[in-house]
């Protein structure tokens, strides 16, 4: 069999007068054969009934990577609603599923179908401790079937364990500290330090074998530029994941060689097959597959909302200071959580490990694919602010991408950091204006006397110009004043709603008395961002119109009027 990009070429020598037949077999069919499903027949997936929700509500996120034990079965609850269990019907990947909503846990299997469990004890737990996978808190919870068993009592599931990274799988020691070098040490410094330490701790000279192996492992990581980069970005688990990925590629190359060996050396088409195999193996060299493997190991791109003030929308900001709180690995804190530099480090996000898929192929048992497995990390992480300078153009639209930075995303054990897109979020704390499309909206608060007897107001606008409002003859509550071309850009306007503060009525008084006065002059009146403006279908609307139209105790549905 010869590997092609979309099809596999199967050559059969039937032995009848040296007649040879060639035909093409679809890749998905052969993949099914390699996965143990001869003929490519796919087993039917377990489906959720339409009457049952498959949602996992956020309140139940603590269930991810936890195992629950009943009288006859165990259920490990994976992300994406997948159940792993020793039950025979759950052996095929994805055949058993789970959900958690409406204060229930639901287990869906091919034969038992949906079994519903009531959640008991959740109300007496600490949500923060549950989120941190505190075993004492998890033990306070149990699940009881809604329908009783044959004995008349409900079946019960109790907390069994947390699926965490194998302590022996990867070393928790920091290679930099093991070799006693700084993070920025160059290759010659690392090599020199390794030679001195390996001689000092060599078992043949009375050294500790464990210490010597730790020194050797640290050097293997730091002496290779790629492995060192992977460690810096995703810890030892990422180094191991990339090694596993390259082994899969090596396995594919070995499969090709095994396929070629099925063709006799004297076969007239042997030379052609050798050429095809050589071309295909050339595509599997480390330089070619490295970018693809790294993409497979990379966390998703995340979007970060950057608050942009009204003034920045009007004037722009050539260099806006912004700090992105990034999650980073605390090196060596897995091995020694009590170390001084580990203070302030908490639980890392779950880590991904690469698990090889094996199958019996025509060429023996071989790796035929890889799958991600999530497990709770033993590593520790902390948040650090990453200072940035971002350019804000005048009138920046909501959701506009300001900058995209590669590999600055949160560090996750076993994964390369994802890219980060910084996007505009209109509005910032302390804003006195609300942006709606190209218009600005603000509220000016005045007293009842000023509304009745009149006032004038003057203040400095966001662009530095002076704005004057003359209502010396008085005004009505919620009157809106428009100032043309005082908004965002050339066509934006400024809308000022005048809000009237009603005086407090003295105890026992049936009315409020006002003393006539001259129109008040107000300099820099108090302004507040308009909360009654919102966007709908791309247009700006105001909510206070509804209150103006309210006429009775029983409110009628009122249409919102467009500004």
Image (cartoon, rainbow, N blue to C red):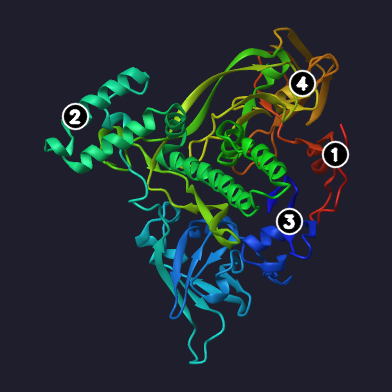
Whether residue 426 is visible: no
Q: Position of residue 428 (x, y in %)?
A: 62, 27
Task: Pick the residue in front: 22 or 172.
Answer: 22
In front: label 3 or label 1: 3
Disc nearer the start of the sequence (1/4)? 4
Task: Pick the residue in front: 459 or 145.
Answer: 145
Disc nearer the start of the sequence (4/2)? 2
Residue depicted at 74% across the width and 70% down the height: 50
Real-space CA distance between mark 2 and mark 3, rounded to the nearest whole angstrom: 56 Å
Residue depicted at 56% across the width and 53% down the height: 371
Disc ID at residue 537? 1
Disc ID at residue 453? 4
Residue depicted at 82% across the width and 47% down the height: 550
Task: Pick the residue in front: 304 or 332.
Answer: 332
Disc ID at residue 199? 2
In front: label 4 or label 3: 3
Image quadrant where one finds the C terminus:
top right
Question: In the figure, 498 relative to 130: above or below?
Answer: above
């Amino acid at each position: 069999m010869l590997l092609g990009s979309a099809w596999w070429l199967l050559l059969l020598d039937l032995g009848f007068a040296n007649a040879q037949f060639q035909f093409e077999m679809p890749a998905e069919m052969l993949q099914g054969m390699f996965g143990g499903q001869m003929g490519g027949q796919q087993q039917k997936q377990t489906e959720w009934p339409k009457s049952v929700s498959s949602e996992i509500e956020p309140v139940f996120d603590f269930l991810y990577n936890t195992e629950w034990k009943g009288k006859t079965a165990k259920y490990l609850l994976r992300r994406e609603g997948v159940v792993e269990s020793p039950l025979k019907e759950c052996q095929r990947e994805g055949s058993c599923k789970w959900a958690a909503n409406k204060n229930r846990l639901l287990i869906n299997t091919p034969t038992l179908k949906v079994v519903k469990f009531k959640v008991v004890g959740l109300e007496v737990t600490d949500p923060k401790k549950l989120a941190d996978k505190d075993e004492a808190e998890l033990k306070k919870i149990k699940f009881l079937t809604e329908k009783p068993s044959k004995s008349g009592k409900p079946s019960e599931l109790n907390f069994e364990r947390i699926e965490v990274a194998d302590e022996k799988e990867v070393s928790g020691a920091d290679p930099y500290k093991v070799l006693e070098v700084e993070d920025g040490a160059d290759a010659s410094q690392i090599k020199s330090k390794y030679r001195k330490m390996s001689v000092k701790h060599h078992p043949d000279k009375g050294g500790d074998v464990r210490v010597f192996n730790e020194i050797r492992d640290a050097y293997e990581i730091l002496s290779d530029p790629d492995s060192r980069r992977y460690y810096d970005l995703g810890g030892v688990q990422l180094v191991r994941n990339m090694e596993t990925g390259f082994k899969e590629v090596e396995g594919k190359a070995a499969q090709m060689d095994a396929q070629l060996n099925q063709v006799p050396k004297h076969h007239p088409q042997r030379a052609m097959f050798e050429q095809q195999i050589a071309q295909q193996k050339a595509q599997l060299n480390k330089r070619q597959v490295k970018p693809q493997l790294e993409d497979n190991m990379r966390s998703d791109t995340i979007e970060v909302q950057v608050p942009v003030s009204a003034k920045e929308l009007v004037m722009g900001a050539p260099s806006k200071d912004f700090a992105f709180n990034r999650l980073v690995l605390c090196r060596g804190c897995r091995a020694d959580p009590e170390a001084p530099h580990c203070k302030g480090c908490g639980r890392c996000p779950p880590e991904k490990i690469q698990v090889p898929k094996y199958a019996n192929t025509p060429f023996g048992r071989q790796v035929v694919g890889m799958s991600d497995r999530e497990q709770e990390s033993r590593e520790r992480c902390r948040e650090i602010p990453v200072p940035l300078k971002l350019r804000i153009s005048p009138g920046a639209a909501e959701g506009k991408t300001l900058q995209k930075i590669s590999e600055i995303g949160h560090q996750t054990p076993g994964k390369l950091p994802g890219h980060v897109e910084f996007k505009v979020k209109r509005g910032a704390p302390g804003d006195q204006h609300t942006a709606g499309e190209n218009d600005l909206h603000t509220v000016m608060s005045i007293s009842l006397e000023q509304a009745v007897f009149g006032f004038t107001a003057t203040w400095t606008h966001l662009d530095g110009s002076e704005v004057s409002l003359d209502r010396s003859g008085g005004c009505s509550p919620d009157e809106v004043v428009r100032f043309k071309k005082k908004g965002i850009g050339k066509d934006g306007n400024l809308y000022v709603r005048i809000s009237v503060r009603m005086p407090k009525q003295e105890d026992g008084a049936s009315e409020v008395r006002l003393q006539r006065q001259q129109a008040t002059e107000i300099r820099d009146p108090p302004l507040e961002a308009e909360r009654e403006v919102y966007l709908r279908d791309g247009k700006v609307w105001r909510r206070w119109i509804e209150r103006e139209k309210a006429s009775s105790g029983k409110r009628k549905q009122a249409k919102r009027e467009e500004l």
